[in-house]
Image (cartoon, grey):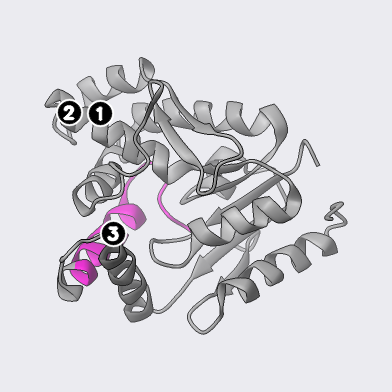
């Protein structure tokens, strides 16, 4: 299992993070949230007063930043230059900032290298928007999760409410639509789904059903799943 790479891509609000964590537990693999890495860089940029669209300074920032995950924690804790930023990166502002930051080619190159290094250490379940197309295109274990727009917005709204946010559902839906547009139309590594993916609509599925579907498909590929 050490060399197994599972790619789980899709837009926000489809259950990627929860599903990928549970799949990783089933497989005994590390869970690598690549979106959290872009969020961490956006947070660092904000703290340093660097605009999210300042490509030159962001490129330098990415090359001098270390982002890692604490193994064995649930949910996995995100370390930015050694400091735990797991909660600080989960705000609407940082979410939008991450989408803008991730459109900078030099940033993507730097973080893709980090992601590949993390995956090559001991395999992993990687979630994001370009795992199966850019980070590990050679893995046969590619899954694209999707859901109806209204379902996705409602899920994100409930998630933010649970964290004490009072952002209206209408705002969450609008920001999600804007991020979808950014992620799908950016020139470098846009969010795409091709025939190499197993596509799963999570709109009417429980998280356990999503995980079961992913693991069942992996078994079809002959992976040694416990």
Mark 1 vs mark 3: in front? 3
Q: Residue 174 in the image: x percent, y percent?
A: 19, 68
Could you tell me how far apart the alpha carbons at marks 3 and 2 are, in whole angstroms?
22 Å
Distance CA(mark 2)–CA(mark 1): 5 Å
Q: Residue at the spot x=33%, y=67% of the render?
A: 156
Crowdedness of circle 1 by 10 Å Cα count: few (<14), some, many (20+)? many
Q: Earlier in the sequence, mark 1 or mark 3?
A: 1
x and y percent of residue 114 in the render? 51, 27
- Mark 1 lies on a secondary structure that is helix
| Secondary structure type for disc 2 | helix
Instruction: Say if residue 54 shows up in the picture.
Output: no
User: Measured along the vertical axis of the image, is residue 124 above or below residue 24?
Assistant: above
Front-lying residue, 54 or 170: 170
Quadrant in the picture for the C terminus:
bottom right
Which residue lies under the disc numbered 3?
163
Q: CA distance from mark 1 to mark 3?
A: 21 Å
**In the picture provided, is 54 more to the left or to the right than 73?**
left
Report the side of 127 relative to 213 (left or right): left
| Residue 181 visible here | yes
* CB contact under 8 Å: marks 2 and 1: yes
Quarter of the image for the N terminus: give it. Answer: top right
- Magenta stretch contains residue 112: no
Magenta extent: 172-193
The residue positioned 40% from the left and 42% from the top of the image is 36
């Amino acid at each position: 299992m050490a060399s197994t790479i599972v790619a789980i891509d899709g837009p926000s609000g489809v259950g990627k993070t929860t599903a990928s964590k549970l799949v990783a537990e089933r497989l005994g693999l590390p869970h690598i949230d690549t979106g959290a890495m872009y969020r961490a860089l956006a947070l660092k940029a904000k703290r340093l007063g660097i605009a999210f669209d300042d490509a030159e300074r962001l490129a330098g920032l990415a090359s001098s930043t270390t982002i890692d995950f604490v193994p064995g924690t649930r949910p996995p804790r995100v370390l930015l230059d050694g400091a735990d930023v797991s909660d600080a990166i989960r705000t609407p502002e940082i979410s939008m900032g991450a989408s803008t930051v991730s459109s900078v080619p030099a940033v993507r190159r730097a973080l893709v290298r980090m992601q590949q290094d993390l995956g090559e250490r001991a395999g992993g379940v990687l979630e994001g928007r370009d795992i199966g197309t850019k980070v590990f295109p050679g893995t046969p274990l590619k899954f694209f999760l999707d859901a109806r727009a209204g379902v996705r917005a409602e899920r994100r709204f409930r998630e933010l409410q649970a964290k004490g946010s009072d952002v209206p559902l209408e705002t969450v839906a609008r920001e999600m639509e804007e991020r979808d547009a950014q992620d799908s139309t950016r020139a470098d590594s846009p969010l795409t789904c091709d025939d190499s993916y197993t596509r799963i609509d999570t709109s009417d599925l429980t998280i356990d059903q999503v995980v079961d579907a992913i693991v069942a498909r992996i078994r079809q590929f002959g992976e040694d799943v416990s």
